[in-house]
Amino acid sequence: WNTRAKREKLTELMFEQYNIPAFFLCKTAVLTAFANGRSTGLVLDSGATHTTAIPVHDGYVLQQGIVKSPLAGDFISMQCRELFQEMAIDIIPPYMIAAKEPVREGAPPNWKKKEKLPQVSKSWHNYMCNEVIQDFQASVLQVSDSPYDEQVAAQMPTVHYEMPNGYNTDYGAERLRTPEGLFDPSNVKGLSGNTMLAVGHVVTTSIGMCDIDIRPGLYGSVIVTGGNTLLQGFTDRLNRELSQKTPPSMRLKLIASN
C-alpha cells in the first residue's frame, strides 16, 4: 500500500545512502503466490489493520479486483479489550510486575508493582499491553467451524489462561464469540455489519470483480496468509463458507501454511 512517492524515496535511499548495485520492488501478493508455487491465485492477506483479497494472474496484481475490509487483527484486539472490560480483568504488561503469588482460579491477582519504574511513552506501554492481548488471542481464541451459536459454544471445551499478573480463569463461549466478527460482522455489538465485508465475502467479491475467464484459476488457488489466519479453526471455517459460495462448475482449493 506504499504510495509512488514513498517507493521513490525508498529507492533513492537504497541507491544514494547504501550504494547498492541493484534494487527491485515487488508486490507482497505476488511474492506470496510465488512462495506457494503459484503464478495465478487469489491471495487473502489478513493482517493488523485490514483483510485484503488480491487477485494475481500470471505474476501480476489485478488492481481492479482488490477488495479490502477493516475486519482484521486490530479489530480482534479491540474485541479482546472489551471482553476484559466486561470481565473486569486488568491488562498489566510484564514490565510492570516485580513479583506475583499463585491464586485460585477467578480470584483477584496478588502481585507487586516494580519500584522506580523508568518513565515510558504511552505508545510503548500500549505496545506491551497489545503483546499480552496477542498472546491471549493465540492461546485462547478459536474460530467456530459454523456460524456462532451460543448453545453450541457453551458445550465447547474451555481453555485455561493466566494473565501476567497471576489472574487466571477458564474461557468457554468467549473464545469462539470474540473472533466471530471476522466472518459475521452482524454478530458484533455496535458494528454495522452491512457496511463491512466478512472474510468470505471479501474473497468472493474480489473474484467476482475479475474477468470470468480467469475465475477458475482464482478459485483453484486461494492462498491464505497473515497473522489472523493462524487462529485455530480459521482456514476450516473459510473453506466451509467458500465451498457454499463456489459455483458448481469451479473447483475450490485453499492453500495455507498452517
Image: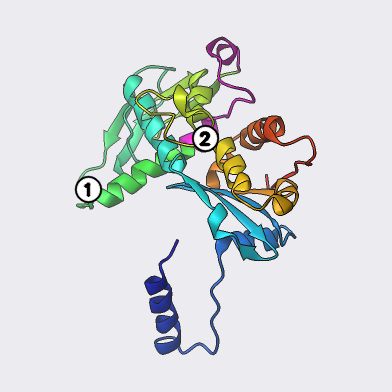
Instruction: For the N terminus, give its image quadrant.
Output: bottom left
Decide: marks 1, 2 in contact (CB < 8 A)?
Answer: no
Q: Quadrant of residue 91?
A: top left
Task: Give x and y (percent) for residue 18.
Answer: 44, 86
Give x and y (percent) for residue 166.
39, 29
Image position, residue 76 (x, y; %)? 44, 35
Q: Is residue 248 above or below residue 209?
A: above
Question: Which amino acid, mark 2?
Answer: Ala
Relative to 52, is 99 above or below? Answer: above
Residue 77, horizontal then vertical, whole percent = 41, 37
- Residue situated in front as seen by the camera: 21 or 133: 21
Q: Which residue is mark 1?
A: 117
Q: Is residue 215 above or below residue 166?
A: below
Q: What's the magenta region?
A: 136-156
Q: Secondary structure beneath disc 2?
A: loop
Q: Secondary structure at mark 1?
A: loop
